[in-house]
Image: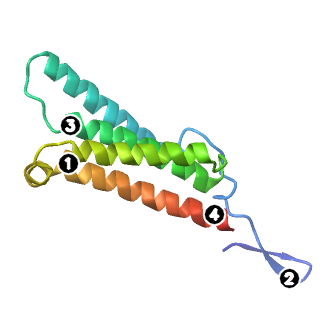
Amino acid sequence: MLYELKAARLEPLQSSRDERRPGLFTHLGSSVALVLGFFGLFGELGSEFKGAEPSGMMVGAPIMILGALAYRSAKKRALGEVASGPARWLFEGATILLILFLLAAQPNVSTLMATDPGPYFVIPLWALTAYLVAAAKAMVRRRR
């Protein structure tokens, strides 16, 4: 921690992280995930219109988009950019439930996880883990 000498005692300086303002790079990771998710979804829809067989990204891309939205919402709560209210909690819960529903709606999901782990295992695991970490940080901040 940074300290400043004031009147013969040390006082901690405010960290630059506390002074962070919303901007272009504040939510860069979730923005990249949103863009990649939309590119994957549009690419998958475009290939289906051409008659190609759908791949796992038809499920992976919406999971990536929903996970990024839930994570961004929880991170905004954790940083104190927005208030934590029931509507935000319902939105986050609904996105997580949609992710789980998209996985559960797939026939033979355990086989798909083994044969095509990217969209059926890695992306959902990443989305859920990122959300849980951000939500835990938001709850810790709320208790302060």
The residue at which mark 3 appears reads as 57
In this rendering, does residue 27 appear at all?
A: no
Question: Is there CB contact under 8 Å for labels 2 and 4?
Answer: no
Residues under labels 1 and 3: Cα distance? 9 Å
- What residue is drawn where x is 31% and y is 42%? 63
Residue 36: assigned label: none
Q: Toward which corner of the image does residue 101 lie, by quadrant?
A: top left
Residues under labels 4 and 3: Cα distance? 35 Å
Residues under labels 1 and 2: Cα distance? 56 Å
Question: Is there CB contact under 8 Å for labels 1 and 2?
Answer: no
Q: Residues within 10 Å of mark 3 (few under 14, many from 20)?
A: many
Residue 120: assigned label: 1
- Sequence-first tag of 1 and 4: 1
The residue at which mark 4 appears reads as 141
Describe the element under mark 4 as helix, strand or loop.
helix
- What residue is drawn where x is 39% and y is 48%? 96
For this orientation, the residue located farthest to the top is: 50
- What residue is drawn where x is 73% and y is 64%? 14
Left or right: residue 127 compared with residue 84: left
Instruction: Report the front residue among 15 and 97.
Output: 97
Left or right: residue 72 compared with residue 48: right
The residue at which mark 2 appears reads as 9
- Sequence-first tag of 3 and 2: 2
Q: Nearer the viewer, mark 2 or mark 4?
A: 4
- Sequence-first tag of 2 and 4: 2
